[in-house]
Amino acid sequence: MTQKSLLVGPFNRVEGDLEIKLDVSDGRVTAAYANSPLFRGFERILLGKAPTEALTITPRICGICSISQSAAAARALAHAAGAQPSLQGEKVATLLHAVENLADHITHFNLFFMPDFTRPNYEGQAWFDRAVARFTAMKGSGLRQAVEARAELFHIVGLLGGKWPHTLAIQPGGATRAPSQRDKIRIGADLNAFRRYLETDLFGAKLESFVEVKTRDELDAWTTGDVGLFLEISRDLKLDQLGVGQGRYLSFGAYPSADGVIFRQGIWQDGKLGTFDPAAITEDLSHAWMLGDTQHPRSGQTAPDTLMRDAAYSWCKAPRLAGDVFETGALARQIIDGHPLAVDLAKEGSVRARIIGRLLEIARTQIALEALLQEIDPKQSFMELVNIPQNGEGVGLVEAARGALGHWVRFEKGEIISYQIIAPTTWNFSPRDAQGVPGPVEAALVGAPVAEGEETPISVQHIVRSYDPCMVCTVH
């Protein structure tokens, strides 16, 4: 029996710093320890500030998902004020938020995930030359088309939000821009252009055709577009057996609509849908360089352990729901929303499942945005007056591209006394808890193959990137 330890990191094509320690025995990972090595302190920066300053500061946590942070902060302040945003303003906020998430998904697939298959490791595979032509960094035709399509899609954010990232367009009372009928036509043209890219390049077919796929057997028959190429690669490399998770999924529910939310809220465990209870969230600090006890985020604080005690190995806290580990992200959203293909993929819980969950969400979100645009009425009000009280507390739960994002704020005499954030990557890349239970990515890495002499295992990179980590969001 051969045993060794590897320290893998930093990871390229990952937002922020990440290190993972691997215990390897006989060519397989037996244990993994995910470290978020960069402490940033945004939650501490917010202390003593006026509550409305959260709208300016929290989007700067991240340059990728800043609108998600903005939406969560606005929702937390509205909750604290006992207010509801304008119905039409909420639709504009949803449009802005969903466009950012769509852009994130496209960026992840084309620029972060697929370029790994152009590595020399895979030279000689039947699909290798096509992967190189499409996804080689700076040169691939797929990358160029994705970046161009993404830029056109962001015209919508420029029109409604003024800029990206760090727009202030989303407020507790709604949205700052009331679109005209002419604006709706321009947004419709941008959505039509993005649909053309998706149907021509990514899916190679009508979006509705992919949404109609209901089982893994039907999925295996898909051969067109970059999706078809990914599925061919996946079969060859057995990505449906790599990085299998613990089978528990969480979604806070995505995008308010007249019927509630576009993608519903809930949990998935033991193969069935359950009810999400936000009061059951805790943050375990046993293996984090943080001071304090396990608390609900409403009562929690961010107090860094500057001595960095030996029992800990990450700045990331360990979020748990009723004591259990939950994975979050696009796959989780689609499983909980009940799409038949996603529910079938829940039985697999692999690298392939996470990527297909993201692709399925791209198609479904595009279709939903086209319908949402038709509902926007330029004649209505897009902003309600919201008075933030001197004392209060609120929570804002949204879904970023990478999964469940929560903001918890408390303030007294017009100053923030507590602001806690649990980001999607905090869930997915959490360290062990007091019971020694690993976080989602730590568990998914167990069993990954490690070739002799391989210092940065390619299988580990595929698994890590299937979660699309955003480490700058992880430790605030």
Image: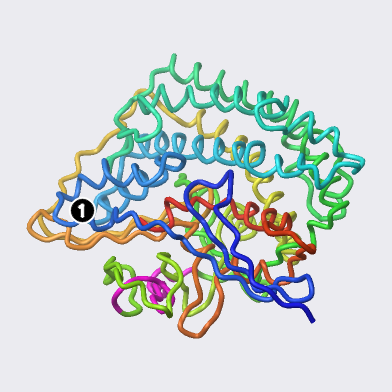
Q: Which residues are magenta?
A: 276-292
The residue positioned 37% from the left and 71% from the top of the image is 289
Tell whether position 277 is magenta: yes
Give the image quarter of residue 268.
bottom right
Q: Amino acid at mark 1?
A: Ala
Q: Position of residue 92 (x, y in %)?
A: 41, 33
Q: Position of residue 251 (x, y in %)?
A: 52, 60
Between residue 179 and residue 139, name the one nearer to us.
139
In the picture, measured across the screen, residue 187 lies left or right of residue 70, that is right
Callout 1 environment at 10 Å: few (<14), some (14 to 19), or many (20+)?
A: some
When the figure is inspected, residue 402 is found, relative to residue 104, above or below; the finding is below
The residue positioned 18% from the left and 57% from the top of the image is 47
The residue positioned 48% from the left and 57% from the top of the image is 424
Q: Position of residue 135 (x, y in %)?
A: 72, 33
In the picture, measured across the screen, residue 435 lies left or right of residue 465, that is left
Which residue is under mark 1?
Answer: 81
